[in-house]
Image (cartoon, helix red, strand yellow):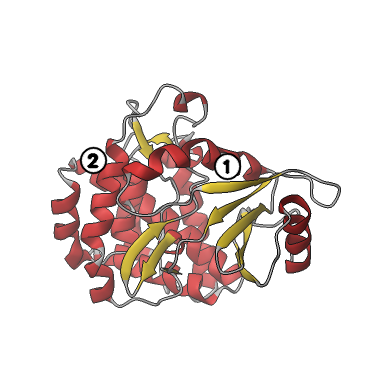
Amino acid sequence: MNQSWAHEIFVDEGLATRLIREQFDFHITSLTDLGHGWDNAAFLVNEEYVFRFPRRQVAVDLLLREADVLPHIAPKLPLAIPHPLFFGKPSLDYPWPFQGYKHIPGLSGCFLNLSRNQRSSISADLACFLKDLHSLDVKSEWKHVLPIGDKRARGSFQECFARVNERLEIIIKAGAISSQEKFQSLLKLAQQITQPNDLESLVHGDLYARHLLLNDTKLAGIIDWGDMHIGDPAIDLAIAYGFLPRESHKLFLKNYGPIGEEMWHRAKLWALYSATAICWYGHDANVKDLKREGQMALEFIKEETT
């Protein structure tokens, strides 16, 4: 399968330092590599700002999307989200724009190896955040900035979940799971579900452990909004299956509000889609935290199929 996370440009600490100094006249006293994701490389500067640099051409539009929308929605949400403050321009050394944000204190949920109880303890805050996000009025001007529908869901569920079967085979060969038998009933469900046409909700679009920030196991912020779009809330609600244990779902639903049975089914399907991608990436790129989170997400989903 195609490895969609392969970088086109590698941004190291030296290049990041040079670009920031040249364009913003920063006196840099410290610069820490925060990691290289699928789309961006991130660096913490002077313990105060996070600068993100696209690693692939496709990520440039995603970064610009954040700059257009995040400042408008940040005051309306109950948790911190990134607020772009510095806007880097293409140069001879680097062909794309980049951005700097005020640092949101906290550790990514994938680094903390949270217990079931610790995950359950943030379920209410996570649900309240998503309720507020999905309830935002989608302004007409955002419709010119944000895509309608998730990029993964441009085809049918059947097309999307053919990829899941391929990933499961790869994951089994890597030794992450022993069998895909438990997931077959869920994959059969994908043959019966249709995608909604009335898309009016603003959704994060890529919500999983790595994009949750926690302080002392309390949910503090939500990061990496490049896949934000107007779409199906089920894509975000998948976090309930892929990050939270089943015993916390009742509290999650109590705080989010009523969810129709079909949307809840779609959320479970998107959780499986995301979990297989995380697990595959974690094993292929040898990222220990993502290997663990991907496997844990698959275990949580498997519990729901028994």
Establish if 59 lies above or below 79. above
Judged from the image, the secondary structure of the residue bearing numbered disc 2 is helix
Specify whether residue 189 is in view. Answer: no
Q: Which residue was labeled with disc 2?
A: 262
Residue at coordinates 46% horizontally, 74% vertically from top-left? 111
Q: Amino acid at mark 2?
A: Glu
CA separation in Å, label 2 and label 1: 29 Å
Q: Which residue is nearer to you in this view: 254 or 304?
A: 254
Specify whether residue 304 is in view. Answer: yes
Can you give x and y, in whole percent of width and height, for residue 151 in the image? 51, 38
Q: Which residue was labeled with disc 1?
A: 62
Q: Quadrant of the N terminus?
A: bottom right
Q: Which residue is nearer to you in this view: 167 or 135?
A: 135
Can you give x and y, in whole percent of width and height, for residue 167 in the image? 51, 59
Total numbered circles = 2
Q: Amino acid at mark 1?
A: Leu
Q: Mark 2 near mark 1, Cβ–Cβ under 8 Å?
A: no
Q: Which residue is nearer to you in this view: 70 or 25?
A: 25
Q: Quadrant of residue 6?
A: bottom right
Residue 305 appears left or right of 239: left
Residue at coordinates 27% horizontally, 74% vertically from top-left? 118
Q: Quadrant of residue 96?
A: top right
